[in-house]
Image (cartoon, helix red, strand yellow):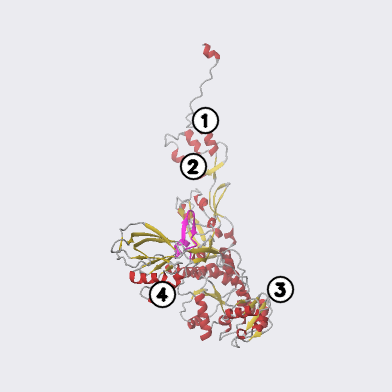
Amino acid sequence: MAGRLVLCNCAGTQAIDADALASATGRTCDRVHTALCCAAPEVVAEAFAAPDTLMACGQEGPRLTTLAAEAGVGAPRFVDIRDRAGWTDDGDPTAKQAALLAEAALPASEAPMIDVASEGLCLIVGPAEVAMAAAHRLRDTLAVTVLLPEGAEAPEDRAVEIVSGRIRRASGAFGAFELTLDALRQVDPSGREIAFGAPRDGARTRCDVIVDLTGGTPLFPAHHKRDGYLRPDPGRPQAVADAVLVASQLVGTFEKTLHVRVEPALCAHSRAEQTGCTRCLDLCPTGAIVPAGEHVTVDPMICAGCGACSSVCPSGAIAYDAPPVDHTFRRIEVLARTFRTLGADPTLLVHDDHGREMIALAARHGRGLPAHAVPLELPALAAYGHAEAMAALGAGFARVDILPGPRTERDPLLAQIALANALAGREAVRLLDAAEPDALAAETRAPVPAAVAEPILPLGTRRQVTRVAAAALHDGAPVVPLPEGAPYGAVLLDRDACTLCLACVSLCPSGALLDNPDRPEVRFVEDACLQCGLCANICPEDAIALEPRLDLSPDALSPRVLNAEEPALCVECGKPFGVASTIERIAGMLADRHPAFGAEKARMIRMCDTCRVNAMAHSADSPFAAAPRPRPRSSEDYIN
């Protein structure tokens, strides 16, 4: 049974084609309301009476939810089609409205959560004049300890715990900070004067919340992303007051989102103590990703969910999970397909919550977005990598515009945009530097190029979607050159230098390099190559180089031979056991040139393992031979 669609034209300020929207979304719509948020409770109850109702209003969602509760009916799902589509001064918004409604009707993806407990242990770091004032405001709600700078005098205030010293090392996150302190001095209250005691180094402590009022170097990288670490400007009283208010609320049990999913078996970080891929380690702004043997691990308490690791991971060992990558692909496909049923050549505007406010301001006070610009809101822009951009272009979007927020890390985005443009063969993905709503509206009105003629269905892994989308965008260009560091490419093998030792095959984490059990051979499946560099790092002959590219021909999906030689045949049993040229080269180097390798020993070099062991065991000077067995003694021996 199709769900119900409730439409409102917001006092006639936006055009609504109810029949077209109902047909495009497969939902029923009885009427178009004029101002449902101002209607009587019985009108709201009638509008929301049916199950699985979708309400085309974003601004008045909380008010309408309250009215629905008063009327005794369930609250619908809300979607904004006014600011994002209806309020525009060019073109018919129906196609974009339908696309937004269809996307909002998709099942929601719930992010996994973990509980974080805080007992309210708070450490305030800073000079006495600001730290003590903050401590007195927090002492009734938190267990406060003040850490004064090294060498500070002990105040006579005993309302809170006071120590002095310096922080040598800090780690952890909200609810589990761990600190190492040097020159730690605790208050000695005995005697006439209150003073600090003797200093000691290497003291360790823990706390749940840190309020850093030093104004100096932060204790953590990307400190604004570290939960529980508050670092206001001590010279701004309002900023300090805001931090104190936030800290006072950090007691109890909280839910933290598990932003990424890790599959260690897929990780190409290292093999046999040789380092390969370090893309996620190089990008993580908070230091949440660390090596753990042959793979990496993510500390969920430190991870801030920027998503950059997911966009650069070549194997899918780290994947964004809030929402999952396949859910993002599904949203992109539904937006493109629904729009193209009523319009042509849409563009995609990817943004976060900052972009949502920009779009709303542009719609209310300016021209709004153009009719072809379809917004897609994501919680983490850095998770939108080249694969997601290629999925959008392959699904039918003519261009992808990414609107960063004030705190968005731009370097990962720029690298992924460059890779996506190389894969697309044109400048199809842009980073918008729009600081004002009017500038955003102007930049999204840039000329729209032609979209792909036959859209794809973005299903599968990020690598699979990228390949299918690139094939749809390129016609007659089987090999697409890519920039350095791309996770797609070929392995170039110097046959003259290669000795077919197969070390590269044994360490390849993705199975791109293969051997042949029947003969000395190195085979290569280009589609599986991650360009992690392990094979080049382990090769003892430096015979391997990497070439970043994307081969769109069917040959990239099948093994091809990089190097092969005739096998050496055992001179005893005739079984193939090695590389003929290598065996002959070793035999030539040792025969008659070393006292341990005469004619008989040189012949053993040309034997397989089994025959060589047999020959050595039965030789006169076998290293495995024991002392001769004693001759059995008989009665005749004793008589004689």
Name the mark on residue 241. Answer: 4
Residue at image mark 1:
618
- Label pair 1/3, CB-CB below 8 angstroms: no
Query: Sequence order check: which comes first, mark 4 or mark 2?
Result: 4
Amino acid on which disc 3 is placed: Met
Residue 292, magenta (yes or no): yes
Amino acid on which disc 2 is placed: Glu
- Label pair 4/2, CB-CB below 8 angstroms: no
- Label pair 2/3, CB-CB below 8 angstroms: no
Residues drawn in magenta = 279-303
Q: Nearer the viewer, residue 322 or 373?
A: 322
- The residue that appears at 52% across and 36% down in the rendered structure is 612
Residue 436 image offset from top left, x and y in percent: 47, 81
Query: Sequence order check: which comes first, mark 3 or mark 4?
Result: 3
Count up the numbered dots: 4
Please, which residue is most extreme toward the top here?
Answer: 639
Q: Nearer the viewer, mark 4 or mark 1?
A: 4
Residue 405 image offset from top left, x and y in percent: 47, 74
Q: Nearer the viewer, mark 3 or mark 4?
A: 4
Location of residue 62 with respect to 548 vertically, above or below = below
Query: Sequence order check: which comes first, mark 4 or mark 1?
Result: 4
User: How far, Cα to Cα, is label 2 from label 3?
Assistant: 76 Å
> Regarding mark 1 in the picture, which secondary structure is present there?
helix
Check disc 3: other Cα within 10 Å, few if <14, some if 14-19, many if 20+.
few
Check disc 2: other Cα within 10 Å, few if <14, some if 14-19, many if 20+.
few
Residue 465 image offset from top left, x and y in percent: 58, 66
Residue at image mark 3:
1
